[in-house]
Image (tube, rainbow, N blue to C red):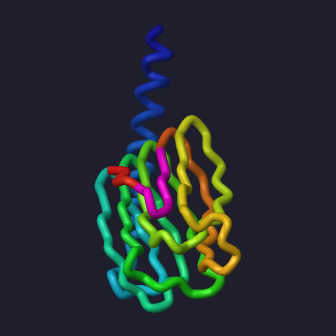
Amino acid sequence: MRSLLAFKLGFWSGVAAAAVFAKRAFPSRGDEESDELALVAVFDGVDLKNRSKAFRGGSMLAWFGGIAVDLREAELAPGARLTVRTLFGGIAVKTPPGWRIESKLLVLFGGADDGTPAKDDPDAPVLAVDGLVVLGGIAIGARAEAAR
């Protein structure tokens, strides 16, 4: 029993230490005018409203934290791609109703919602989303609620 307890304590201590290292090694980049974002939320949260004139995408990592991004005032560039990853965290990306979301998400013990009204509109601007969800949640689209 003691060895199992020691293993669990060691495992969670290692996960927390790795998260702290990742927080320092990968700082967030991007602001409300950035065309590309690289957001990292480890044991904290990021809340951003983007007004880019040619949003190309970027990456988001939520590890024991949350990211909320509002893209409703941004204009989408052709070929925009967003990579999202969450481990024990959440990501919410609000998009305009006219955007089409094409997602390829691998979800393990978590949830993902890419609800967008323009799914069937072939002329709608397309945001390609790929990523991984482990014990967390991702909501992308016009109906996205805050994940934090």
Q: Nearer the viewer, residue 89 or 17?
A: 89
Question: Which residue is drawn at the image coordinates 36% and 87% (left, top)?
Answer: 33
Lateral position of residue 86 relative to residue 72, left or right: right
Examine the image and state in which quarter residue 128 appears: bottom right
Label count reads 0
Q: Can the viewer see residue 83?
A: yes
* Magenta range: 137-144
Vertical side of 105 occupied by 123: above or below: below
> Residue 34's x, y, as percent?
40, 86
| x, y percent for residue 19 | 41, 51
Indicate the quadrant where residue 48 lies: bottom left
Q: Nearer the viewer, residue 106 or 144?
A: 144
Residue 26 seen anywhere in this rendered image of the structure: no
Q: Is residue 104 within the magenta segment?
A: no
Whole-percent x and y of residue 29? 39, 77
Residue at left offset 55%, top offset 62%: 117
**In the rendered image, the vertical position of residue 20 relative to residue 55, given as above or below:** above
Main SS of residues in magenta: strand
Residue 70 vs residue 119, the one in the foreground:
119
Furthest residue to the top?
Answer: 1
Q: Eyeballing the image, is 47 above or below 1?
A: below
Q: Residue at x 56, y 87 (%)?
A: 77
Residue that appears at 48% across and 54% down: 139
